[in-house]
Amino acid sequence: MRVTLREVAEEAGVSMMTVSNVMNGKAARVSAATRERVHRIAADMGYVPSASARSLASSSSKLIGLLVPAADEDSLMISPHHMAIAGHVERELRKSGYHLLLRGIARLEEVTEALHSWSLDGAILLGFIDEQIDKLTKATAGPTPMVAIDSYSRNRLTAGPRSDDFVGARLAASHLLSLGHRDIVFAGPAFGRVGVVRERFDGFRAAFTDAGLTWDSGLVEIVNTTHDEGFACGQSLLERHPGATAVFATADILAVGIMEGLATAGAAIPRDVSVVGFDDLEFSKYVTPKLTTVAQDIGRKGATAVAMLVDAIEQRTQPRKPVTLDVSLTLRDSTAPPR
């Protein structure tokens, strides 16, 4: 049976208000001896402060929503990259005294519903395309602070952290070009005028311009960021692009699927086709061959998102500018000079 605040107060011989103040760190006028006695008795009795009571006292729920796209009522669209970020976000929120609420969003209106139904102190948007984020307004979102991870939207309500996607893709393509590859396939999901994939596409092409080369714009594979679609793409890739000697995939999970599909079709990696991914997720070190990939600091991205949001909550304002994080190229076994 749950120990109550009243029971702790009776055992300690003090008022309930004194116990509440001590347990909530608001005991400046309580003697050190009393504070010590209250803490000792509470611990001995197994008293656990009520989170809801703390919320009422502080007018803060201490809840942060991690909002992710939901394909339908039953499915959250969470990639391995997003799962890794979610883990770092939860850890950083815990350090700051906040709790994480994961919520799938199938319709933009559900952002407003989530913010108000759960009395969220703030929200982190993860995995939304910029066209969706552009539509969020003060009228729909209210005053609740928000940050969006990996967004290139100019919406001032959602400024957040992102990796330098342009530079990362340019590093990947430059590496392949330095090995002697020229017919390089760009593989990734459909993209518009702005966004993560657009930045990676532009950075990829910039590497050819830097080298004084012209890239064959027909060497594109539009494929969603899943292992299964990457596998299907890899199986038939050399039929559609018989001269290709390398592939740059916009995500590690897609790159691994493409490698496995190519192998099933009889191609050896990297002897016949070199492959580069983007993310440097943990599994990229354990596949065969180990994946050459663009490394982004996912831990720092999650920590930056939390820091920006907590600062906005405490300052009662919105983050003003996005933060762009550095990337690097991790060389492993999936790339080699063309035969």
Image (cartoon, grey):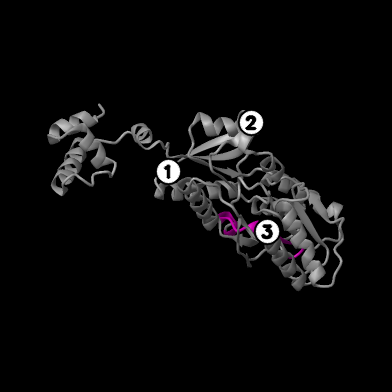
Q: Amino acid at mark 2?
A: Glu
Please tell me which residue is depicted at 62% across the width and 34% down the height of the picture: 139
Image: magenta residue range:
271-285
Residue 46 at least partly seen: no
Q: Is residue 10 left or right of residue 105?
A: left
Residue type pointed to by label 3: Asp
Q: Which residue is mark 1?
A: 98
User: Between disc 2 and disc 3, whose residue precedes?
Assistant: 2
Q: Secondary structure at mark 3?
A: helix
CA separation in Å, label 2 and label 3: 29 Å
Alpha carbon separation for disc pair 1 and 2:
25 Å
Q: Which residue is mark 2?
A: 109
Residue type at mark 1: give it.
Tyr
Mark before the other along the chain sequence, 1 or 2: 1
Displayed quadrant of residue 79: top right
Question: Which quadrant does the N terminus fall into?
Answer: top left
| The one of 172 and 27 positioned closer to us in this rendering | 27
Crowding around mark 1 (Cα neighbors within 10 Å: few <14, some 14 to 19, many 20+) is some
Q: Is residue 236 something that shows in the picture? A: yes
Taking 53 as reference, is 21 left or right? left
Q: Which mark is residue 165?
A: 3
Residue at disc 2, secondary structure: helix
Q: Secondary structure at mark 1?
A: loop
